[in-house]
Amino acid sequence: MELFKPKRVDAGTLTPQLKNPNRVRDHLANERTYLAWMRSAIALMGFGVLIVRLRILRPPLAPQPPGNGWRLGLAFGIVGLLMVLLSTAHYFVIRRDIDADTYEPTDRWVIVTSIAVLLLGVGVIYYVFSIPLESLNAVIVE
């Protein structure tokens, strides 16, 4: 297997000669960016689960309808899954562009992601402020 074979080293040096060290650096930066997108996607999905669980775990002081908390949690989960798919596709496009030496940065994904997170943030703010204050001040006495 070629993957585990050691690289050839010139007789006069202790390190292998790289054709283009900038290309390696670019690929490593692309991988770090991909992993950052993955962390963000996992955080979004986890936050969606948290929103749903908080709505379910509210104390049953007064009978209340289930509300729209599950929809907000579902939106976070869907955006997180979409982020996984889009970031994976973006990683391979950038990898191909780096190899072909044709990479040009685009603003499209930054704008799309910013709008998605902005809409989710508005949903969280609405969700938090739509909870009746009476249920927050009540204490269960046994």
Image (cartoon, rainbow, N blue to C red):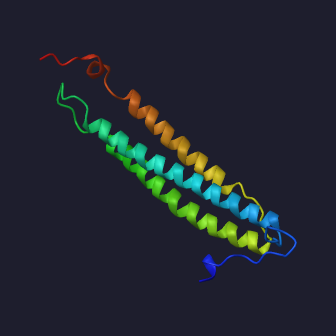
- Where residue 62 appears, as percent x and y from the top left, is 18, 26
Q: Quadrant of the N terminus?
A: bottom right
Q: Hey, which quadrant is residue 29 in on the image?
A: bottom right
- x 82%, y 71%: residue: 17
Specify the farthest residue to the front. 11
Total numbered labels: 0
Front residue of this view, candidates 91 and 29: 29
Q: Quadrant of the C terminus?
A: top left
Front residue of this view, candidates 56 and 5: 5
- Where residue 4 appears, as percent x and y from the top left, is 61, 76
- x 70%, y 73%: residue: 96
Does 89 sit left or right of 99 as displayed? left
Vertical placement of 31 versus 140: above or below? below
Does 62 sit left or right of 38 as displayed? left
- x 77%, y 75%: residue: 100
- Where residue 135 appears, as percent x and y from the top left, is 26, 22
Does 108 sit left or right of 19 as displayed? left
